[in-house]
């Protein structure tokens, strides 16, 4: 009989650390990857109508709230870094959309945050208005957090609001597809990567015993991802029938 092979404890520990590092890297940057094909699609078509910029709104609010939730309840640093990367990604998407929309705009009328017109909320022509809105939201959250940091109820509410908004990530896209009766201009790769990422991170949350808000959020996102993919099938079939 062959002698039993004994794996050195140091080697096992190193392998585990490498896997842990890789998983953390995927968590930090993986959430932003779905927006690469959508970014490319908008650049290619020179059109933003298929992508709902309210996806950016939902994610910006969710990740700003998550950062303040971390201040009150310090969970994994990985999730904090993920929020920072996601905020940068959303600003990149908004910057591209503003440039495309301003290039294609026929009317000379500008819609700005300073107009305080609710009808044009999050439809501003100037990119600067979006970071300005987020800065104002961050200041408000900072003041509330300073005053109520010792309140466990407030901290948990921050976490619940953060995951609620994140769970609604795909809802604006779902509604825009329904309104357009089409998924044209929306990157299907983006939704498939949403699905893969949501499955991965929900599993990650469960394995790492993250706050329950996180895995509940991931589960809701998976349901919305499936609904959007069903829209792709349904509207694609409807289009083929019209062409036929």
Image: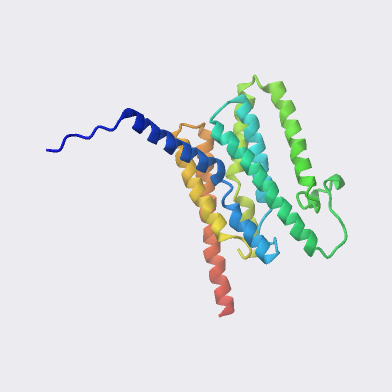
Percent from the top left, x then y, of residue 86? 62, 43
Residue farthest bottom in this picture: 244
Q: Tell me the quadrant of the picture where the N terminus can be found.
A: top left
Which corner quadrant of the image does residue 228 belong to?
A: bottom right
- The scheme the figure's colours follow is rainbow
Q: Residue at x 66, y 61 (%)?
A: 42
Q: Would you say residue 179 is visible in this rendering?
A: no
Please indicate whether residue 91 sits to the left or right of residue 114 in the image: left
Which corner quadrant of the image does residue 47 belong to?
A: bottom right
Question: Of 238 and 138, which appears nearest the observer?
Answer: 138
Q: Residue at x 56, y 35 (%)?
A: 79
Question: Of 50 and 157, which appears nearest the observer?
Answer: 50
Which corner quadrant of the image does residue 155 belong to?
A: top right
Q: How many marks?
A: 0
Percent from the top left, x then y, of residue 212? 50, 33
Q: Residue at x 59, y 28 (%)?
A: 156
Task: Look at the picture and state if 156 lies above or below 124.
Answer: above
């Amino acid at each position: 009989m062959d002698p039993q092979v004994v794996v050195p404890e140091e080697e096992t520990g190193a392998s585990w650390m490498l896997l842990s590092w890789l998983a953390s890297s995927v968590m930090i940057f993986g959430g932003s990857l779905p927006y690469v094909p959508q970014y490319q699609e908008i650049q290619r078509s020179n059109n933003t109508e298929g992508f709902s910029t309210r996806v950016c709104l939902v994610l910006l609010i969710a990740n700003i709230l998550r950062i303040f939730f971390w201040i009150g309840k310090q969970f994994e640093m990985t999730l904090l870094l993920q929020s920072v990367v996601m905020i940068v990604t959303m600003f990149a998407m908004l910057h591209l959309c503003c440039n495309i929309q301003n290039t294609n705009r026929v009317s000379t009328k500008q819609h700005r945050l300073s107009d305080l017109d609710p009808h044009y909320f999050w439809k501003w022509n100037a990119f600067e208005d979006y970071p300005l809105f987020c800065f104002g939201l961050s200041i408000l959250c900072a003041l509330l957090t300073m005053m109520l940091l010792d309140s466990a109820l407030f901290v948990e509410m921050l976490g619940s609001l953060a995951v609620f908004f994140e769970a609604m990530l795909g809802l604006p896209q779902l509604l825009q597809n329904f309104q357009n009766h089409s998924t044209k201009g929306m990157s299907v790769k983006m939704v498939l990567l949403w699905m893969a990422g949501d499955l991965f991170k929900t599993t990650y949350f469960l394995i790492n015993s993250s706050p329950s808000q996180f895995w509940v959020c991931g589960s809701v996102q998976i349901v919305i991802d499936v609904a959007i993919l069903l829209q792709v099938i349904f509207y694609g079939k409807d289009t083929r029938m019209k062409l036929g």
